[in-house]
Image (spheres, grey):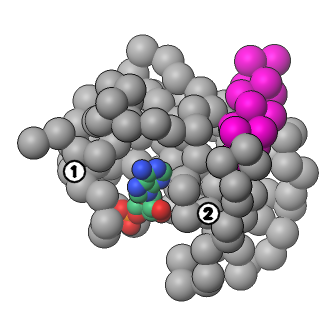
């Protein structure tokens, strides 16, 4: 059965898309730890991040680097943090989170709430920076 992220990539479930290329898809996490919290996923479905082929991890990290730069321009922060968890969704993904402090990376923190319009604007802002 396709994962929820495969359904998002296929357009069967809506998402706030930030960036895309042939291999990868980036969209906003709907339970963000910070405004701009983005997930990067390979279109090719694999559960465990560290089971990805070497060349896929390398290409994913290069794509993620561009997304992180776009997030930082859209939402100025000290650095963009990267995390791999995958305990909830069995489709490898990287979390990118703009950090104002180390505390912003604590996944036990309460998640922020945004309206659909706010999510849309956040995604559009990062997307515009990605395209630059
Ligand atoms: P984990 O697998 O532990 O890395 O967590 C999965 C992440 O995916 C969580 O931060 C969720 O908020 C996020 N998530 C789950 N479903 C969706 C969705 N439909 N759209 C955006 N983010 C999602």
Relative to residue 80, is residue 49 drawn left or right?
A: left
Relative to residue 31, is residue 24 drawn left or right?
A: left
Relative to residue 97, is residue 55 drawn left or right?
A: left
* Label 2 residue near ligand 1, CB within 8 Å: yes
Question: How would you rate the neighbour count of disc 1 (Cα within 10 Å): few for under 14, some for 14-19, many for 20 or more?
Answer: some
Q: Residue at x 70, y 55 (%)?
A: 115
Quadrant occupied by the N terminus: top left
Nearer to me, 12 or 99: 12
Nearer to me, 41 or 8: 8
Quadrant occupied by the C terminus: top right
Residue 122 on the magenta span: yes
Residue of label 1? 47
* Label 1 residue near ligand 1, CB within 8 Å: no
Residue of label 2? 32
Whether residue 93 is visible to the viewer of this picture, yes or no, is yes
Front of the two marks 1 and 2: 2
Nearer to me, 48 or 59: 48
| Residue 88 x/y as whole percent | 31, 66
| Residue 61 x/y as whole percent | 51, 38
């Amino acid at each position: 059965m396709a994962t929820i992220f495969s359904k998002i990539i296929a357009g069967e479930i809506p998402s706030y898309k930030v960036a895309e290329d042939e291999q990868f898809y980036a969209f906003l996490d709907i339970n963000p730890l910070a405004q701009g919290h983005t997930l990067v996923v390979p279109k090719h479905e694999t559960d465990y991040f560290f089971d990805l082929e070497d060349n896929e991890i390398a290409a994913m990290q290069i794509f993620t680097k561009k997304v992180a730069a776009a997030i930082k321009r859209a939402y100025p922060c000290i650095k963009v943090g990267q995390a791999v968890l995958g305990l909830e969704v069995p489709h490898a993904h990287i979390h990118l989170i703009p950090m104002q402090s180390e505390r912003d990376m604590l996944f036990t923190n309460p998640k922020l709430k945004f309206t659909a319009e706010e999510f849309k604007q956040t995604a559009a802002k990062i997307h515009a920076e990605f395209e630059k």
